[in-house]
Image (spheres, rainbow, N blue to C red):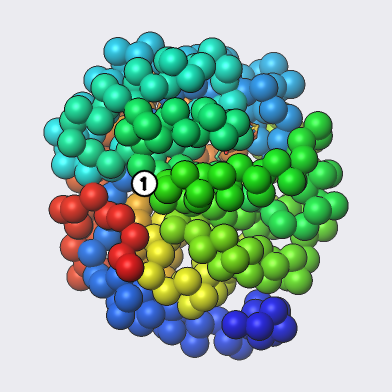
Amino acid sequence: MKKQEIIDILSDSTKNDWLFKKADSVRHNFVGDEVHLRGLIEFSNICKRQCKYCGLRSSNKEVERYRLLEDEIFSLAKNGVQLGYRTIVLQSGEDDYFDTDKMCRIISKIKTLDVALTLSIGEKTFDEYKAFKKAGANRYLLRIETTDKNLYADMHPNAKIENRFNCLYDLKSLGYETGTGCLVGLPNQTVESLAEDILFFKDLDADMVGIGPFIPHEHTPLKNTDKGDFWLALKVMSLTRLNLPNINIPATTAMETLNPNGRIIALNSGANVVMPNLTSTEYRAKYEIYPGKICINDQPEKCRSCIEAKIKSIGRTISKDYGFRKR
Ligand code: SAM
Ligand code: SF4
Ligand code: FES
């Protein structure tokens, strides 16, 4: 699509139903009816960065910080495999305690479990990404958050958008399945810039794209900002499906936080992936990126059966394979 077409659809609410149906049929035709599950382990909430929207930013002193031991991470992954997950996602703040050696050790141990492994641990150097890949990591999630240079600079003190772009192109060149995405509803964000975000996903040839509505956190500078609009986030997601028909697109947890049926609505509007939480309940509440996160008191077993029931209720099935991008 051309930028103007995307802007027109994003700005016209009479096109919503058409768009959601179209994205659902493109999803069906290109990636089928199977839903891929990814088991998410939030292994450290310690972060050196200052993203203005995020509850884990280093200057938030209200959050109780934790890091899991290597053995704890491995046993959560093992539990995930026993629950039938074929992909494990390791996510954290940018926590330098987990240096290259430690990460490589964790990666190679989890890879003995016969699973695909995704990392979501922020901006690293080319050599670090290369080492993780060599240790066995298959995929990497790094949202660009916004392609609007001024907005990016405003939201990310002391960070450079050029580095974020470089990281994504590095990951691609190293052969990772590369995931990116954006936040919808950041202050002063425009539909023009959301259209640019979608064009960037296409330019990168992203293998996965996660779109999440922004949800304000009370211990951040954006505490008094309006939350993102669920339907606008859904539209960005559906337009992403139309422009990159064969990629993996998650129904994000943030969508379910804003709408009790958010993940099912997303699965019916272009999404084909869900990322249930494998973190133990002891730590879930402390990984508070934004308030109202779902499932904070639920055990991994509960989430696994809950999501299976939801997926079956809309006539979809759970994939038994690793869920790489279908070419
Ligand atoms: N630290 C890594 C990074 O930033 O790439 C991974 C963890 S970070 C918590 C994962 C994602 O959370 C970010 O890419 C961001 O889009 C999302 N996020 C952070 N704060 C949020 C908020 N207030 N509302 C919605 N999503 C948020
Ligand atoms: Fe840290 Fe990621 Fe939160 Fe930014 S979004 S503060 S990098 S955890
Ligand atoms: Fe966690 Fe439903 S996915 S309880």
Q: Residue at x 19, y 57 (%)?
A: 319
Quadrant occupied by the C terminus: bottom left
User: At 42% from the left edge and 21% from the top edge, which residue is drawn?
Assistant: 103
Say which quadrant the N terminus sits in.
bottom right
Residue, disc 1: 275
Look at the picture and state if 291 lies above or below 9: above
Alpha-carbon neighbours of circle 1 within 10 Å: few (<14), some, or many (≥20)? many
Q: Position of residue 42 (x, y in %)?
A: 43, 29
The residue tagged with tag 1: helix, strand or loop? loop
Residue type at numbered disc 1: Met
Quarter occupied by residue 83? top left
Q: Is residue 2 above or below residue 99?
A: below
Query: In front here: 260 or 324?
Result: 324
Could you say where residue 178 lies in the image, as x and y percent from the top left?
47, 50
Where does residue 259 sit, x and y in percent of width and height?
49, 57
For residue 129, above or below residue 4: above
